Amino acid sequence: MAQTSTIKHYAKALVELGIENQCYDALVADLVDVDAKINENLEFKKYLTDKHVTFAKKQEALKNTFKDFVGDKSYNFLFLLIKEGRLLELSSILEIAAKTHLKAQDLFEIIVESVVPLTAKQEKEIAEKLAQSIKQKLIIKNIINPEIIGGLKIFLGDTEIDGSIRGKILRLKKKIEDYE
Amino acid sequence: MAEKKNDYVIEALKKQISEFNEHVAVDTVGRVLEVGDGIAKISGLSNVMYSEMLDFGAGVFGVALNLEEDEVGAMILGDWLKIKEGDVVKSTGRVLEVPVGENLIGRVVNPLGEAMDGKGRIDSKTFYPVEKIAPGVITRKSVNVPVQTGIKAVDSMIPIGRGQRELIIGDRQTGKTAIAIDTIINQKGKDLICIYVAIAQKESKIAKIVAKLEEAGAMEHTIIVLAGASAPSSLNYIAPFAGCAMGEYFMDKGKDVLIVYDDLSKHAVSYREISLLLRRPPGREAYPGDVFYLHSRLLERSARLDKEFGGGSITALPIIETQAGDISAYIPTNVISITDGQIFLESDLFYQGVRPAINVGLSVSRVGSSAQIKAMKKVAGKLRLEVAQYRELAAFAQFGSDLDEATKNQLERGKRIVEILKQGQYVPMSVEKQVIILFSAIKGLLDNVQVEKLNEFEIGLHNYLETSVPEVMKEISEKKEIDEALEAKIIKTVNEYKSTVDEMLVKTETES
């Protein structure tokens, strides 16, 4: 996994550049868009990563496809990745960049799984409660997961707080199994 | 009666309703990034401990082995095919531990302490960690109580004491396991608990061993820890540590334990497999750099504790298989240097019919002699010398035909000693009997017995001693040494027996 550290460097550079030039959101939005499009069209992806195609041709193809929808800086970043042969790692770079960006802003993202979407009031209450224990600002990402049946399942980084009905049933199951 | 029961239920419910609170489970979790060959890479799991058990769900557990910046390398105990990429892994907060206790005795278990013999579940309340720091200097005591193996060649020349680590080394099919099994059988009715750890052994072989031990009534004091040849290498890797943990429980109770690790070469191979899959850098013979530490930390846990600390002991008999007698390969040299001596078995001797095929020259016991009983010590010193001289002369005598009388006599004596040291499998012998027959051999009492008839003579002599003059053996077991009076008594008895078995003696020329 020597590659992870290089990916991290790209991600960090991307975030710092974005913050310095105050265009992080636009930059990332562009790149996420491009990433999605490339992954949709496998032929195109193959063409861009083909070693036999010259860099200039790839550049041209990219410009023709996305035209003005993508900013200059985003183009530069994509060209750099193509040149270094790291276009396939774009998704992971963006993933790490998102985390780095949150960290740079001293924010902590928690994931809350629920069956029905949380109301704004609920979100606020959860954020307040958890902020006390981890002493950091929080943003909440709500994921709808019908599998948990009811209740909430919260991921605070590596810590999982399981208050879901499914979790309770599983714990009960284990208790019965161990009882014998 | 029924009403009372209902009341109780209602009370319980009432209590639960009034004190109802939501229980949530808080766990440290990670996700599986990569899985294969019994190894998983997991992201997350911050604050996980080394050697901590990980719950992969679906009843599969793992052990954290590689703690890196943002991922954890773990080995999976059990069926890794049930694990998929992206699965949630929970840390358990417990380091790997195995059930220990009295109810394991007489059972065949896997390295996790689960029954393998179909005799039902083993319920144990006590757990011991698989990895544990060995007892320190202060808590230890030097070795001075013997472990009687019941094998003449071992008990006399390569004695083993309680708390010692004696390596059994040799090529395949030279009787390494046989020595260990005979030792276990010989502990019947004594105060030693035996643990036999089979590492990557064929299960058919283990089934045979168990049957033999049961037949000999030796399973009553024995635990068998079995990691079969088809078990994942993670189980093979933890097997000796698990066996040791089971032994430590008894040692802490002040009891004496004997552990056989059969065999550590396969253990090193399993560890190499895990290490390479975890991408640890390979070293000599592709073993990882810490393969010495692997065995030294295991064998260091064998100890004899001081009375103040319980006075228990763990004696270890590790086994190493060599390739074509090469004891200077990596793993053999490592383990030789860790242990307090070795019993070296040779295939040449084995095929010559010297069984157990112990090479007396290369075998040593560095601490065991202080654990021998005085009677045996008296016999053993002379015996070793005689055997060594015989070896030298025998090699020399091959070149010349006309030898002087003294040399001839010495050769004849040597032949008889080698013959006496031969012993069948599964027939361990009590120390008193050993002393008498070896004493007779070195005193020259057997010099006029035909070499071919010695085995028969020995059996007859022991029968005679048991039935006609039992006081001789009784005296040895009580006094534990041979004084002049006893010496005369033994010589008298042996001569008495000899006079009854004329047909076994060498016909002198004057007679014929």
Image (cartoon, coloured by chain):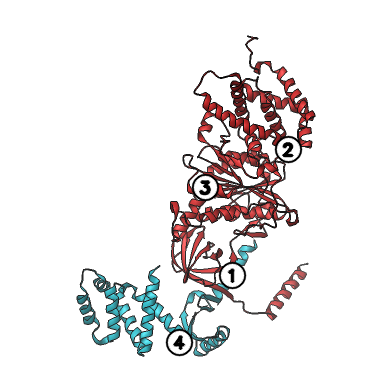
Residue position marked by numbered label 1 in the rendering: A171
At mark 1, the secondary structure is: helix
Instruction: Name the residue type under label 2.
Output: Lys
Q: Are marks 2 and 4 on the same chain?
A: no
What's the residue type where badge 3 is placed?
A: Thr
What count of labels does the image hold?
A: 4
The reply to whether dot 2 and dot 4 touch (C-beta < 8 Å) is no
Q: Which mark is residue B418?
A: none
The residue lying at 46 percent from left, 65 percent from top is B41
Q: Quadrant of residue B11?
A: bottom right
Residue under circle 4?
A: A105
Q: Chain of mark 1?
A: A
**Relative height, residue B146 to residue A69 (above, below):** above
Give the answer, above or below, for where B332 lies relative to B127. above
SS for tag 2? helix
The residue carrying mark 3 is: B333
Q: Quarter-wise, where is residue B454 in the image?
A: top right
Q: Is residue B417 visible?
A: yes
Instruction: Look at chain B in the picture and name its colour.
Output: red
Q: Which image quadrant: the C terminus of chain B? A: top right
